[in-house]
Image: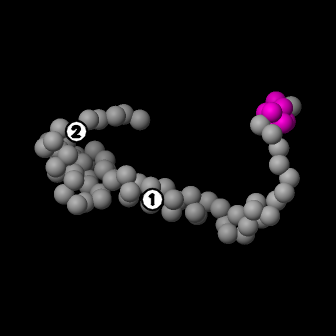
Amino acid sequence: MTRITLNDAMLGLLGEGQEEAELYDAAGNRLGYFLSDEAYRRLVCRWANTQVSDEELERCRQETESFTTAEVLDHLRNL
């Protein structure tokens, strides 16, 4: 991921209470979106919650069998 350090002027534009912003170049082409850390985390958590059903989570909670890291790696090497 590219890391960009914002100057105070840009930080002020993004920090005016907005959780999201569209970013454009001087020609008016949309470059992408800015999300605050809180908005990004909320979005990722919402997506993650769609990937696993409540039933699957409960089944995993009830599971008692466990494996060490070495056992898992050994199993993967033997696939």
Coloring applied to the structure: one colour
**Magenta-span inclusion, residue 4:** no
Spot occupied by residue 73 in the image (x, y as percentages of width and height): 79, 33
Gap in Å between the C-alphas at discs 1 and 2? 23 Å
Tell me if I can see residue 27 in this picture: no
Crowding at dot 1, Cα within 10 Å, few <14 / some 14-19 / many 20+, comes out as few
Above or below for 63 versus 7: below
Circle 2 residues within 10 Å: few <14, some 14–19, many ≥20: few
Q: Position of residue 19 (x, y in %)?
A: 30, 59
- For the record, the magenta segment spans 70-77
- Describe residue 16's horizontal placement relative to residue 61 as left or right: left
- Image mark for residue 73: none
Specify whether 32 is left or right of 61.
left
Task: Identify the disc placed on residue 43.
Answer: 1
The residue that label 2 is drawn on is: 6
At a point 86% along the width and 53% down the height, the residue shown is 65
In the image, 64 versus 48, the foreground residue is 64
Q: In which quarter of the image is residue 68?
A: top right
Q: Is mark 1 on a helix, strand or loop?
A: helix
Where is residue 1? Give x, y as percent. 41, 35
Q: In this view, does 75 lie above or below 58?
A: above
